[in-house]
Image (cartoon, rainbow, N blue to C red):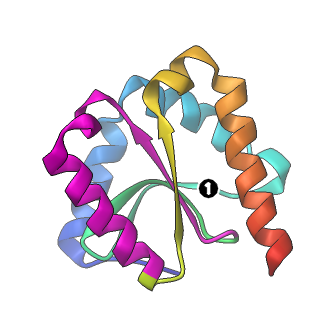
Amino acid sequence: MVSGPRDTLIKARKLRRDMSLPEVLLWQELRKRPAELKFRRQHPAGIYILDFYCAAARLAIEVDGWGHDSADVRKKDAARSKYLRSQQVATLRVPAKAVLENLEGALARIVEVCTGRLAKD
């Protein structure tokens, strides 16, 4: 399991209290354990904090809002994904707009990717 240093853990706890609307809506569904999958929210991974994490599938789920459109943020996202790959964790990026407009579809895609990764093991 990926984890992080104490200061990252403290920041993750704060982020759990300050989740965005798309994150809150998605968490309300993920916490129901769709397809018997367990998810964690705002999970520390090294110096990074993952929006959601499925340990069984080794999958990080990142909800990307409009802020992820800038070149600087895309560069940081690429560094995060590279680190996660080094830890054998895949990243699934879900646009915040997709969560707001089609929560069921976003959830179905997450479950599909998780079960697909589990089937490969």
Q: Quadrant of residue 3?
A: bottom left
Name the magenta segment's main secondary structure: helix
| Residue at x 68% of width, y 69% of height | 57
User: In this orientation, which residue lies closer to the viewer: 45 or 96?
Assistant: 96
Which element is circle 1 on? loop
| Residue under numbered circle 1 | 39
Residue 82 located within the stretch drawn in magenta: yes
| Residue at x 64% of width, y 33% of height | 106
User: In this orientation, which residue lies closer to the viewer: 62 or 30?
Assistant: 62
Residue 109 located within the stretch drawn in magenta: no
Establish if 93 lies above or below 44: above
Q: Give the residues in magenta.
A: 57-85
Question: Residue 42 at what x, y percent from top left?
Answer: 40, 53
Establish if 5 lies above or below 14: below
Question: Residue 33 at what x, y percent from top left?
Answer: 74, 48
Question: Residue 39 at what x, y percent from top left?
Answer: 61, 55
